[in-house]
Amino acid sequence: MVKEAKEMHSSEPSPAVCKTCNIQLLKVARELKIPYENLAILEQPKRVINVNFPVRMDNGKVRVFNGYRVQYSNARGPTKGGLRFHQQVDLNEVTLLAFLMSLKCAVVDIPYGGAKGGVIVDPKQISKAELEKVSRAFIAEIAPFIGPDQDIPAPDVNTTPEIMAWMLDEYEKIVQRKAPGVITGKPLEAGGSKGRMYSTSLGGAFVLREYMKNTKMSKDIKIAIQGFGNVGYHLARILHEWKFCVVAVSDSKGAIYDSKGLDIPKVNLHKEKNDTLKGFSGAKYISNEELLELPVDVLVPAALENAIHKGNANKIKAKVVLELANAPVTPEADDILNKRKIPVIPDILANSGGVAVSYLEWVQNLQNYYWEEEDVNNRLEKLMVKAFDDVYNFATKEKTSFRTSAYGLAINRILKAEEIKGHISLK
């Protein structure tokens, strides 16, 4: 099989080929004995859009911005994925995230393919008026390639429901009709869904709960969460409401730790008042790195990519890692944790609650009928419980890790869809 892979890549690959994606594909192919030639259709994205567009800034000067939209696979439905505004956005990153989104949608078994996009811009360095101009100009550039039945963007890093509303308005001006289903993560007033704000966190909580049930893990556990942004805070809040003991949380500056458990509502009030976790009464102030190495039962990296790497993987003391950030565990660290028998519940399962409720928002938009928050959360729970059961059962059957199971399950579903359409013949 390794020989087959080498032969396939003997020539110089196209710039559109995602090398990291291919490494992951090869790893899954080896472990699950999938003929590598079956995976050729997933080696590179279906469509890559690179746009350059001018925006007149507040000072009257014109600045040209660069943006991307990568539509990786539409085998199972219209592509779906976030848009990020960041000064370090690049095509390789966007392509990898589009690949992962394709797998994520397949894992949670919703009728979507995967996409991702972004603009190279630091929103903190421009005015709100300029930010709106950039948002509208970018969506105008990619408008011919998106739509409720084609590709559906959503918020990601540094993009907000307000930005989604600007983009929706611009798109509807271009197509001259109402089309709320073209974008998800919108404000409620623009066709957004109740429950969307904390859906990633609630989905992760459901996955953790199901893991604990299936492994007979005691509820008397200690949990550390790296991150206290939207995802980290809401996860901490939900777990606290469920009577779990959250002993540590962190922001970009540092972390707080109390082995007896933190009062999350009070922590949030302190953070809002002081713009820092430092100084919270009764808790020890530690670094983000120290939080990762705490003696806890569950460690939740919910902030940074590559937070757990080969330099600190041997220092992790948690009994299980729940990935709520995107790619918080590097492949090298993943191998180390596997050897140490520390299960990692992968991001494409653990944080798929966000795209699951985006799907529910899209469904509501298409039928122009909107559900109450409890209805949305109940539907999310059903999706997440089934997704966990599918991954857990696949892992048990194949005697493999959760990550390999999730990847294998997703890849098989995508390939089956391609085969049914006559695009490939599985061996």
Image (cartoon, rainbow, N blue to C red):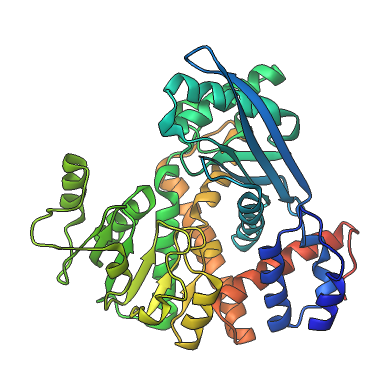
Quarter of the picture holding the N terminus:
bottom right
Residue 314 sits in which quadrant? bottom left
Give the residue drawn at x 63%, y 22%: 54
Residue 245 position in % (x across, y down): 23, 68
**Which one is in front, 42 or 17?**
17
Report the label total.
Answer: 0
Quarter of the picture holding the C terminus:
bottom right
Residue 309 position in % (x across, y down): 46, 71
- The residue most toward the left is 282
Give the residue drawn at x 49%, y 25%: 131
**Which one is in front, 253 or 302?**
253
> In this rendering, does residue 243 appear at all?
no
Q: Is residue 174 above or below residue 38?
A: above
Q: Is residue 176 above or below residue 335?
A: above
Residue 40 sits in which quadrant? bottom right
Residue 115 position in % (x across, y down): 66, 48
Q: In this view, does 115 lie above or below 177?
A: below
> In this rendering, does residue 33 appear at all?
yes
Give the residue drawn at x 45%, y 33%: 123
Q: In this view, does 295 lie above or below 207?
A: below
Taking the image as shown, residue 187 lies to the left or right of residue 115, namely left
Residue 211 position in % (x across, y down): 43, 74
Taking the image as shown, residue 360 lies to the left or right of residue 125, namely right
